[in-house]
Image: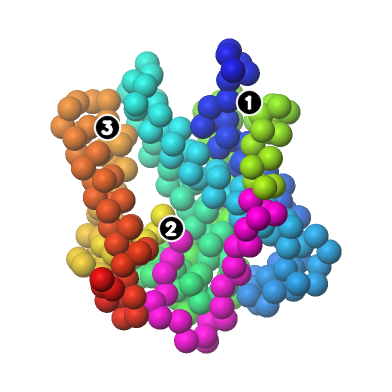
Amino acid sequence: MQGNNRITWGDISFHSFIIAVISGVIVSFKYSPSSPFTSLEVISGLIPWGEFFRRLHYFSAQSFLTALILHKLDFLKRNVKYSSSKWFTEVITLFPISFLLVFTGYILRGDKSGIFARDVAINLVRTTPLMGPVVAKLLFGSINSPRLYIPFLNHAVIFTLIMIYLLFWHRRLILPDTGKLIFTLIPNLIAVVIFNPSIGVPVNYPLDPVKGPWFFLGIQELVYEFNPFIGGILFPAILLLSLGLFRNGKVFKILFWFLLLSYIFLTLIAGLLRGPGWQLIL
């Protein structure tokens, strides 16, 4: 497809975000932050069309984040002319907010994995000097609490509104293209019909190992192997910074690709080779 009709990863990410917002608003009417897992069971099993919109929200959110990553990597591959300062600003704003948006959505499952991911994230952010504990509470709430009011507020309102603003700033429009929206919706609907993303298991269920979302697995592996601050805060910060400075010299390019490939490798280890007690299974 040529001209304005050409569909890019950026278009897919943008329209997936719109689908995720619409389906998320529908699901939120029956969602309860005070009893998250129970409310998801009700949405999935008792509410008409609840399971459909839950699945659609899940897959469109995954599509949004995945396509955003591929969109930025495609820019690097094609070496598109772009202001270094604008590239840096977009990278250090869009990526953190998009990851926080999807991550808080994962937390809101309220299952064992979601609460575990929330508590790990709180402990990691707390290791940040000076304002770590305050920032952790503002982002994810209180550790070991079954109530998810703060993650819900951040996910459904604050991070969503910030992302809408960032997308408007990036694209200079927020209205979807009907053709591209349908193109993006179709594979998400196919995924809804074929796959059933689990709502997880209750917090008291004996699950070992407990693993977070796919984009968090590398962090889990790093935290296990190294100091939590180094693995959970410093490494992601350097990876993000090297991507933001990618256009400023060969050193940053080499550093970014090295860190990215390392993170992918660690993610594969955590996802495929870690068993009970986080021990390697070979």
Question: Residue 220, image x and y in percent?
Answer: 33, 65
Q: Quadrant of residue 15?
A: top right
Q: Say which mark, if any, is on residue 214.
A: 2
Q: Nearer the viewer, residue 35 or 178?
A: 178
**Is residue 23 left or right of 100 when viewed as pictured?**
right
Q: Nearer the viewer, residue 157 or 133?
A: 157
- Crowd band around label 3 with a 10 angstrom C-alpha radius: few (<14), some (14–19), many (20+): many
- Residue positioned 53% across, 81% down in the render: 203
Task: Say how many tags the image has.
Answer: 3
The answer to whether the residue labelled 2 contacts the one labelled 1, judged by CB atoms less than 8 Å apart, is no
SS label for mark 1: loop
Question: Residue 25, image x and y in percent?
Answer: 72, 53
The answer to whether the residue labelled 1 contacts the one labelled 3, judged by CB atoms less than 8 Å apart, is no
Q: Which portion, as a residue range, is magenta? A: 191-214
Asked which colour scheme the image uses, the reply is rainbow
Q: Residue furthest top?
A: 3
Alpha carbon of mark 2 to alpha carbon of mark 1: how far? Answer: 31 Å
Q: Main secondary structure of the magenta part?
A: loop
Alpha carbon of mark 1 to alpha carbon of mark 3: how far? Answer: 26 Å
Disc 1 designates what residue? 173
Q: Say which mark, if any, is on residue 3.
A: none
**Is residue 90 left or right of 22 when viewed as pictured?**
left
Q: Residue furthest left?
A: 251
Q: Upstream in the sequence, badge 1 or badge 3? A: 1
Q: Amino acid at mark 3?
A: Leu
Q: Amino acid at mark 1?
A: Leu
Disc 3 designates what residue? 245
